[in-house]
Image (cartoon, coloured by chain):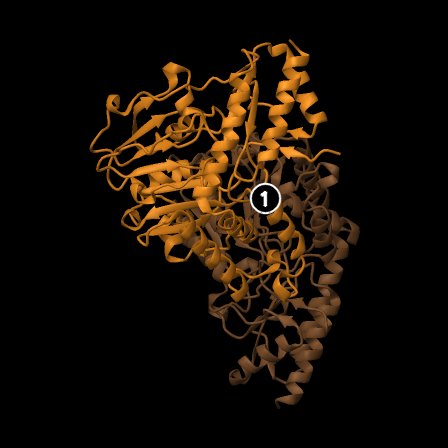
Chain colours: A brown, B orange
Amino acid sequence: MSPVFNFSAGPAVLPKEVLLEVQNELLDWHGTGMSVMEMSHRGKEFMQIAAEAEEDLRNLMGIPKNYHILFLQGGASTQFAMVPMNLLRGRSSIDFINSGHWSKLAIKEARKYASTNVVASGEESGYANIPPEDTWKRDPEAAYLHYTSNETIGGLEFPYVPNSGDVPLVCDMSSNFLSRPIDVSRFGCIYGGAQKNIGPAGLTIVIIRDDLLGQTVPGTPTMFDYRIHADGDSMYNTPPTFAVYVAGLVFKWLQRQGGLKAIEQRNIEKAALLYETIDTSSGFYICPVDRPFRSRMNVPFRLADESLDEAFVKAAQARNLLQLKGHRAMGGMRASIYNAMPLEGVKALCAFMQDFSKDHR
Amino acid sequence: MSPVFNFSAGPAVLPKEVLLEVQNELLDWHGTGMSVMEMSHRGKEFMQIAAEAEEDLRNLMGIPKNYHILFLQGGASTQFAMVPMNLLRGRSSIDFINSGHWSKLAIKEARKYASTNVVASGEESGYANIPPEDTWKRDPEAAYLHYTSNETIGGLEFPYVPNSGDVPLVCDMSSNFLSRPIDVSRFGCIYGGAQKNIGPAGLTIVIIRDDLLGQTVPGTPTMFDYRIHADGDSMYNTPPTFAVYVAGLVFKWLQRQGGLKAIEQRNIEKAALLYETIDTSSGFYICPVDRPFRSRMNVPFRLADESLDEAFVKAAQARNLLQLKGHRAMGGMRASIYNAMPLEGVKALCAFMQDFSKDHR
């Protein structure tokens, strides 16, 4: 049987090496006689696991000392409210870039707490691109500028880090977290759900600059206060311990791959292969995103003849190429090729796509 | 080597059978070639896992049809704010029973959103008991009556379900969830973190009567709105999929044990053994809770001679009896003997306690 390749947008494929480690020590972590799932979060074993995960992430991303790393719950959807409740700091308006589905949800939720100002939008281009930075109308009094570095559904990824001037830059990095090196010092706050490049669903990572802590709006739940979690080393209450542990193993796996520079090279190579297959299909496959904004993580495409969609998904499944159907909001197909998707998986997909197009011309 | 018994208050011991199942199918769930951690929450495989978990829980607890079961994140600490934000329904005051540490935290958080009225408190007795129901001063206009059915730290467990009259009854059931049969129809809302009797940390279960949905206070984050999660079958956003899966296996394990009546009998037997060991120690061990309110789940006790505490913990560890140190707020010892703690674990603990007391008189 050919190997299974899982192109799910998230929860998504994890490195096989990591899954094997988890399996091996599932009932007995390092001779303790306990599963990590059974450990008190305040015991020395789990404290060590959590501290290593944090340190490894700090090293991988080069996170400066004046930033806290928080291991939280609730996904990016929770951050859509938590960010404004923490970062308004007496201001009344937030700048946003609208790059698609997830940006729009972040904007909608923020409207509960502030007025919102869309400084740039991909809407006119059908989210094929974002207008150039020199056309943006940023508000120097904004509480912060928020953008979504990679749109998981639409497949629009920023090829650059926006300039936010003196205003803190906030980024929903859920679906391209850890896929390339970034300069964390340019950000006030970075957040992301774990279930793409980090680990199992149920863990949310927030990286926040210390001077932004501690000014929540009235009525903010204690569990929504970044400072509470920062002061408690993400153990104000019980953290999602098993997810933190798996994430920690993924961080160590990334180190073994050579870190973010090395993983970026692989991601560039994988994405190039897949986009090339689309672009050289003589219009059989179509990608809706302009080249400079094409995501390295989530590759949306459609078949020119939509009546073939079902046959495509079925034939792919028969070759063990799974979860290629596009998000219900977009239709068509989507191949998510996160860090843990091996090159051979992308090659298998490209080979299948070429075969399928030949068979159905 | 003698087997390891883990008395952690949570995250806590899980049934060995469940951990073996998880281990066996960790890389390949039911021939899919995927780990459950890698599955899209909207794929048919995970949808089936989640639907079965919900149905099995409904059957186990006899949850009526007019209640929603929600699989959420954030722990009971999140519910301390989420409950008032959803259940105030235009009222301005909440009735509380103060039975210890967790009740007090729930009260403190609720004060952000309403006035609070403590109708009964264990404080005067040092949380050894709760005054009789006929002395309570309930407010018939209260939004709801909140209590903590089992105090994980103090070891005070309600032997009965309080009468809340016409006011909805809300219960933090985190640490005795699924430990005995209860009549769900007496409650407006039950919530609990999973990391005691349900599964891994990072999952929170809420059981809520449908007529209480949909009246959040202004400014409630979307992710704090029970109705959003009820309407979305707990998939408004990505749920903590792996934790839901493990919880589902625990529910099936409970069914194989004979359900909640059978597990209650075992819990009664285990707790009786341990309290008897304490009570027949001629004062060497002391339990601070009055008999009717003694928890079947968390058994706090101290050594009359506190200078022996460290020796006790060390000697216990040498016999593979782990995590017996009491919560830092209480001191002394605590043995948590949840559903998954086998009778032989309690017997091993009792035998050790008897030996230790003989050696140190």
Residue at the bottom extreme, as displayed: A361
Q: Report x, y in % for residue A140.
A: 48, 45
Callout 1 secondary element: loop
> In terms of image quadrants, where is residue A36?
top right
Residue at (55%, 48%) from the top-left corner?
A: A202
Q: Report x, y in % for residue B115.
A: 29, 29
> Where's the N terminus of chain A, which quadrant?
bottom right
Q: Which residue is mark 1?
A: B15
Camera sees residue A14: yes
Above/below status of B114 relative to A270: above
Left or right of A307 in this view: B134: left
Residue at (72%, 58%) from the top-left corner?
A: A16
Q: Report x, y in % for residue A265.
A: 75, 60
Crowd tier of the residue under label 1, counting other residues whose Cα lies within 10 Å: few below 14, some 14–19, many 20 or above: some
Left or right of B308 in this view: B46: left
Q: Report x, y in % for residue B23.
A: 66, 52
Above/below status of B152 relative to A135: above
Chain for mark 1? B
> Of A317 and B173, which appears nearest the observer?
B173
Q: How many marks?
A: 1
> Where's the C terminus of chain A, which quadrant?
bottom right
Q: Amino acid at mark 1?
A: Pro
Left or right of A271 in this view: B148: left
